[in-house]
Amino acid sequence: MSTINGLPAHVLLVHVIVVFVPLTAALLILSAVWPAARRRLIWLVTALAAITVALTPVTTEAGEWFQHKLGGSPAIDKHANLGDTMIYFVLPLLLVTALLIIIHLRDERGRPVGRVITIFVAIVAIAAGAAATTQVYRVGDSGSHAVWGAQAP
């Protein structure tokens, strides 16, 4: 996919990633540390994480098309290289979500996992969420600098 309604697809898709990554991370962490939230949010978090994982390579592919269309520059190349790493930050969100689904289903069936496992998964969720949010910021910041450069307000 290269354009959507005449606009570069990357420019539009990146907004989904910029919103979904921190939203997914925040809800994932909330679900990991608060069982009542997990009961209410686990399926929403799962959907958000799956959509984010699915759209990340689509967004980076659209970005590569846009990069070739614009021509390379050091700033655009840096942004593209950082963007290519984003999948490694969103996949852990989905994997931790899968662990939370197991914890949720076992709780629902009256066979909870141990407290140590639940705490471990919460720590991993916090780490994965913080890492993904930080990386989406870094990728977005490099993209802003590539587009705006010294013109940024």
Image: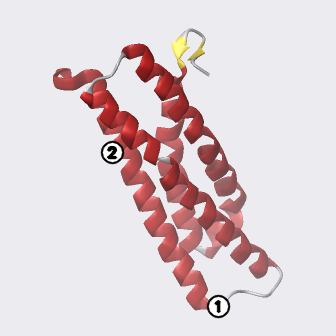
Q: Name the front one of labels 1 and 2.
A: 2
Q: Is residue 61 above or below residue 35?
A: above
Q: Quadrant of the C terminus?
A: top left
- Amino acid type at image mark 2: Arg
Q: Nearer the viewer, residue 85 or 55?
A: 85
Q: Disc 2 marks which residue?
A: 138
Q: Quadrant of the N terminus?
A: top right
Q: Is residue 74 above or below residue 47?
A: above
Residue at left offset 66%, top offset 50%: 50
Q: Is residue 7 above or below residue 43?
A: above
Q: Is residue 59 above or below residue 150?
A: below
Determine whether label 1 and label 2 are within 8 Å by CB: no
Residue furthest to the top in view is 6
Q: Disc 1 marks which residue?
A: 114
| Residue 42 locus on image (x, y percent) | 68, 62
Residue at disc 2, secondary structure = helix
Residue at left offset 35%, top offset 35%: 79
Q: Earlier in the sequence, mark 1 or mark 2?
A: 1
- Amino acid type at image mark 1: Gly
Residue furthest to the left in view is 150
Residue at left offset 39%, top offset 34%: 80
In this image, 6 relative to 86: left or right?
right
| Residue 61 locus on image (x, y percent) | 54, 31
Classed neighbour count for the residue bearing mark 1: other residues with Cα under 10 Å, few (<14), some (14–19), many (≥20):
few
Q: Nearer the viewer, residue 1 or 93?
A: 1
Classed neighbour count for the residue bearing mark 2: other residues with Cα under 10 Å, few (<14), some (14–19), many (≥20):
some
Residue at disc 1, secondary structure = loop
* CA–CA distance in space, label 1 to label 2: 36 Å
| Residue 116 locus on image (x, y percent) | 56, 90
